[in-house]
Image (spheres, rainbow, N blue to C red):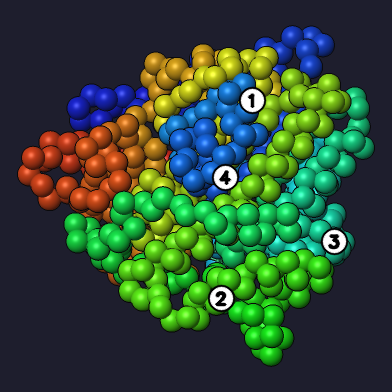
Amino acid sequence: MSVPNKILNQSGISLLVAATSLFSCSTKKDKQEGEKQPNIIFIMTDDHASNAISCYGSNLIQTPHIDRLAKEGIKFENTYAVNALSGPSRACILTGKFSHVNGFKDNQSGAFDGDQQTFPKILRENGYQTAMIGKWHLITEPQGFDYWCILSGQHEQGDYYTPDFIENGRHITEEGYVTDVITDKVINFIDNRENDKPFMIMYHQKAPHRNWMPAPRHLGVFNDTSFPEPDNLFDDYSHRGRAAKEQDMSIAHTLTLDWDLKLLTRQELLNDTTNRLYSVYKRMPEKVQQKWDSVYAGRIAEYKSGRLQGEELVRWKYQQYMRDYLATVLAVDDNIGRLLAYLEEKGELDNTIVFYTSDQGFFLGEHGWFDKRFIYEESQRMPLVIRYPKSIKAGSVSRALSMNVDFAPTFLDMAGIDIPEDMQGVSLKPVLANAGEIPPDWREAVYYHFYEYPGEHSVKRHYGIRTADFKLIHFYNDVDEWEMYDLKKDPKEMVNIFDNPEYNKERGELIQLLRNIQSVYKDESFKDNNI
Ligand code: SGN
Ligand code: CA
């Protein structure tokens, strides 16, 4: 059993970084003879902001089934992606290691090294039957699974309608709506599983990823709804640096009229079959196309009337964005309800750890944006709720600073399996076992490093930390700018206080803490590159 690896920053604050604590390192020996290992269903959606989940206080949507998981389990309020982008987040989750260690730093310049150690491989070696179903997005074939079926269309993002998959190496196309199809496959896997083994399923939805195409049953459901706007929808970035000013992810300028806002009539689509929207429209059955046409007709007419200009147009775009995005979330939640009902009926619900998260957060108009990538709260923060009544007290809430690299060690720990020493995350089991309370010696900060620049949406490279009260960020590469936020006073991160003399003391401590963390996690590229 390893001793907590504590580091003291200059102010003497302890920092639990890599090692496992006395509670978190359970070994095979700890397991009682004959004790049943839990099943694990790891539900992960793509780009689901906490602000679009009702148990996180959303004023936009009701998600009763995700709420049920929280009500009967635990909700984490401070779980963070360490690199808020799909492929990198997935690689961190599989390996329990940061991007610079697992090697998959961005979506555009490489493939995941599938030969390395991952938690599904370890579970499988320890008697689990394992499956990966849905969005994978790591370019190389999945390893460590008895069954895998991954989305293949749209550069592995998948299609909302009539989606293409690769199933154990074979290319297939399925009829139906992607969120339903993926869930059918999960239920089918459980139905046909080997009964003498526990199972672990990575159940990874495409939704609510761009370009936000709702299920047939949800087309138009929010047409008459007007969603509350975030109060910083018209942020002018006047108290921040170049990164915020030079991004390309704004509702005003980046959202496209065709792909995102869907402002093309059927006739216009048929006349321009090279348009990307046509490539997804044509995948819908004719009946669905008819419903689509009638639902979007009003929106198209409104836009074409030409009366929308300036701020009013931005407000209007925000409403359309929310209508589509939130309608795709409805199907995610429906299907969780369907899965929970199925597990209940089979008597498996209470033997199963049901884990809900998203690969990162997402901007829903805050700062005028959609997308993610930034270390700012809406994007860095991940929803995380876990139901497992055997060891989690119903209704627990935790503010423990946690990261996606903690998931792999948590799964292994919950299954009673040794956590490899080289995993950089720590098990959340002690938090789960103690109704969400933060264990003594818990970490003081979470770490972040984003690399995909130059790239889509033009978010500059940066790294940083988030403590309970502050955030410190360094943007580098074609810029050298620091930002710091007082999260208690300024939770929306509107005013950079890095150069505010009132915060000199905290600034020094945070820089020291950041450098300590980088040293422990072995992310010291800033030394060589002067970043
Ligand atoms: C696509 C989207 C981007 C998105 C990336 C990464 N463009 O390229 O808006 O940031 O995926 O998302 S789209 O025109 O294809 O919709 S991620 O979640 O997979 O990292
Ligand atoms: Ca994503």
Separation of marks 2 and 1 at Cα, in angstroms: 43 Å
Which numbered disc covers residue 358?
A: 4
Q: Where residue 485 sits in the image (x, y, percent)?
A: 24, 44
Which residue matches tag 2?
Answer: 300
Which residue matches tag 1?
Answer: 387
Question: In screen coordinates, is 299 left or right of 51?
Answer: right
Q: Amino acid at mark 4?
A: Ser
User: Which residue appears at 57% of the width and 45% of the height?
Assistant: 358
Which numbered disc covers residue 275?
A: none
Camera-side residue of 468 and 234: 234
Q: Where residue 445 sits in the image (x, y, percent)?
A: 35, 34
Question: In screen coordinates, is 351 left or right of 322?
Answer: right
Q: Nearer the viewer, mark 3 or mark 4?
A: 3
Asked whether the beta carbons under mark 4 and mark 1 sit within 8 Å of each other, the answer is no
Q: Nearer the viewer, mark 2 or mark 1?
A: 2
Which numbered disc covers residue 175?
A: 3
Separation of marks 4 and 2 at Cα, in angstroms: 32 Å
Element type where label 3 sits in the image: loop
Asked whether the beta carbons under mark 3 and mark 2 sit within 8 Å of each other, the answer is no
Label located before the other in sequence (3 or 1): 3
Is the CB of mark 4 within 8 Å of ligand 2? yes
User: Which residue appears at 58% of the width and 71% of the height?
Assistant: 298
Camera-side residue of 459 and 117: 459
Q: Amino acid at mark 2?
A: Ile
Label located before the other in sequence (2 or 1): 2
Label located before the other in sequence (3 or 4): 3
Q: Amino acid at mark 3?
A: Glu
